[in-house]
Image (tube, helix red, strand yellow):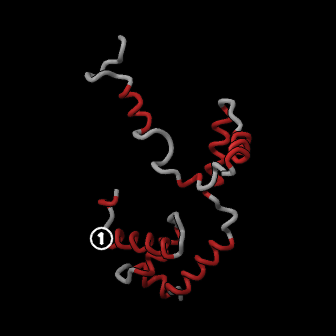
Amino acid sequence: MLHQFTRDNRTTLAFAYQEAADLGHTTLGNDHLILGMLCNARLSAFGILGEQGLTLPQAREVVRAHHEANAADSDPDKDRIDEDRDALAAIGIDLDRVREAVKGAFGDDITDNWGKRRGGRGRPGGPERAERSERGPHGRRHGG
């Protein structure tokens, strides 16, 4: 997809990622894209934003203050825990009971850093790989 972006837009995106990282944010948001635009003087948006009185230092401070004020509202770990709690409940597993049992036995909360699991969610390769593994080397299902 990035090959469809102009060089200036790719540069802006790189600036936006760097701004997010510099602010200690783990996700890229629209606010970071605006910061990226303010970093790239070659963009027409840079001039337009500047004409409106928006500067990079000012915008950084607004983004920093916004994220600090809304940190409790947007917790990606909590969102993932809620999603997983619902999915596990559908198959009869109470995540909160498992969590308390593990914490009682080992003193660790299994949901610490829940959203930062290595390798993402699910099996490596996803459903496509699982389907391929059901087939033999010539694409035929085993046992049939």
- The image shows residue 29 at horizontal and vertical percentages of 52, 66
Q: Nearer the viewer, residue 59 or 106?
A: 106
Residue 51: image location, x then y, percent: 49, 88
Q: Quadrant of the C terminus?
A: top left
Is residue 38 left or right of 80 when viewed as pictured? left
Please name the residue shown 69% across and 63% down the image.
73
x, y percentage for residue 45?
43, 78
In this view, the residue farthest toward the left is: 138
- Where residue 38 appears, as percent x and y from the top left, is 45, 81
Q: Determine the residue located farthest toward the front in the rendered image.
A: 106
- Mark 1 is on which residue type? Arg
Task: Residue at 61%, 49% (x, y): give it.
Answer: 80
Q: Is residue 79 above or below residue 124?
A: below
Quadrant in which the N terminus appears: bottom left
Residue 144, compared with residue 96, is above or below; it is above
Above or below, 139 relative to 123: above
Quadrant of res 102: top right
* Mark 1 lies on residue: 7
Q: Is residue 125 left or right of residue 121?
A: left
